[in-house]
Image (cartoon, grey):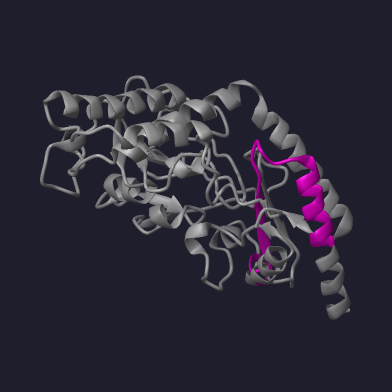
């Protein structure tokens, strides 16, 4: 496994050393964060430090942070029973709660009013949205930690976050709310998280989440994601040189700096994923939460691609640790398989 190249950062980013260190330190802290004695206060201090780190990194100083088990739980907490509209490009955890559908342009852009849920960045294509003022809910999962975000200035009422997408641990997330928003708890049995989510906080996971958010913000400030974008652009040029008929989904739109969704009609996405896996490269055929389901991408179909093309896509998503040499090695391996595909269909 040591020679493998990981190119699936949108599914889950590698654990940051800062998060690992924070989690190891938190493991040895005794006490329930709801207890008032010294041990409990020490545990509570870890949770509140992380809450502050996330507020700072997310530009949410005036907002409330409700810790959850991940973005899926945060979505249920924010969306259940609200009857909001959303596009078919939304992640499943949002899409399942929406009762009305919004149209999506060929470039992935969505036009909506405030009574909607719109993701800030799409996990499959990387498309970034212009969010309307007063928007009810936005999924910031893929954007947070990759591009600068200011929640307090976004006009969004509620935002969804996930720790493991930015180098924190799996199993930790958050719902971010503008101060004063009334929210019905879905898990009850205690007054945890300001009465909005009952259950003892995942202190270790939250510690890693906060540390990862702080480190991710430093990467943005230091221009590391601009370097990622340069590598991504070089990869796309190389792939299209090899396969002139290949389509980069939403190539001309505003996108995340790390995401390439490439379509070669007729070359099944899951086939490409398996071929690249055998060659030592981890890529995906869409959202990780839809993996194992052999079907066309709902996101690409919403953008106007037919079912045939939408089933012929793979996503390459990279990060600050990815090198130019690694993506070029991937391009070479992909190009070799592409030649075999063309020979078979000739």
Residue at 36% in and 40% down: 205
Q: Quadrant of the N terminus?
A: bottom right
Name which quarter of the figure residue 222 lies in.
Answer: top right
Name which quarter of the figure residue 60 lies in.
Answer: top left
Is residue 310 in the magenta section? yes
Report the magenta residues as a range.
Answer: 308-335
The answer to which of 261 and 288 lies nearer the viewer is: 288
The answer to whether residue 151 is visible is yes
Residue 112 rendering spot, x and y as whole percentages: 46, 43
Residue 136 rendering spot, x and y as whole percentages: 35, 39
Q: Is residue 294 above or below residue 93?
A: below
Describe residue 293's horizontal placement relative to residue 252 as left or right.
left
Q: Quadrant of the C terminus?
A: bottom right
Is residue 214 in the magenta section? no
The answer to which of 173 and 21 lies nearer the viewer is: 21
Residue 161 rendering spot, x and y as whole percentages: 41, 40
């Amino acid at each position: 496994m040591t020679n493998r190249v990981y190119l699936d950062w949108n599914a889950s980013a590698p654990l940051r050393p800062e998060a690992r260190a924070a989690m190891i330190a938190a493991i040895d802290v005794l006490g329930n964060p709801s207890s008032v004695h010294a041990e409990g206060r020490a545990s509570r201090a870890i949770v509140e430090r992380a809450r502050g780190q996330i507020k700072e990194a997310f530009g949410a100083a005036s907002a409330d942070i409700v810790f959850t088990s991940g973005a899926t739980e945060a979505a249920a907490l924010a969306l259940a029973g609200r009857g909001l509209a959303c596009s078919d490009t939304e992640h499943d955890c949002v899409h399942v709660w929406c009762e009305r559908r919004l149209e999506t342009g060929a470039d992935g852009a969505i036009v909506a009013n405030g009574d909607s849920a719109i993701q800030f960045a799409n996990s499959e294509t990387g498309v970034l949205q212009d969010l309307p003022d007063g928007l009810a809910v936005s999924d910031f999962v893929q954007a947070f930690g990759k591009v600068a975000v200011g929640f307090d200035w976004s006009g969004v009422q509620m935002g969804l976050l996930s720790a493991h997408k930015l180098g924190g641990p799996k199993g930790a997330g958050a719902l971010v709310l503008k101060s004063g928003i009334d929210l019905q708890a879905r898990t009850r049995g205690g007054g945890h998280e300001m009465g909005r989510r009952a259950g003892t906080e995942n202190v270790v996971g939250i510690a890693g989440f906060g540390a990862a958010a702080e480190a991710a913000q430093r990467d943005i400030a230091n221009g590391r994601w601009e370097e990622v974008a340069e590598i991504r652009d070089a990869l796309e040029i190389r792939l299209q040189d090899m396969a002139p008929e290949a389509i980069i989904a939403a190539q001309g739109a505003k996108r995340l700096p790390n995401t390439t969704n490439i379509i070669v009609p007729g070359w099944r996405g899951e086939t490409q994923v398996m071929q690249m896996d055998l060659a030592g490269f981890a890529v995906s055929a869409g959202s990780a939460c839809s993996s194992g389901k052999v079907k066309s991408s709902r996101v690409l179909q919403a953008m106007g691609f037919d079912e045939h093309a939408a089933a012929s896509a793979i996503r390459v998503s990279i990060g600050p640790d990815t090198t130019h040499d690694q993506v070029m090695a991937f391009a070479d391996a992909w190009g070799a398989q592409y030649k075999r595909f063309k020979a078979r269909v000739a």
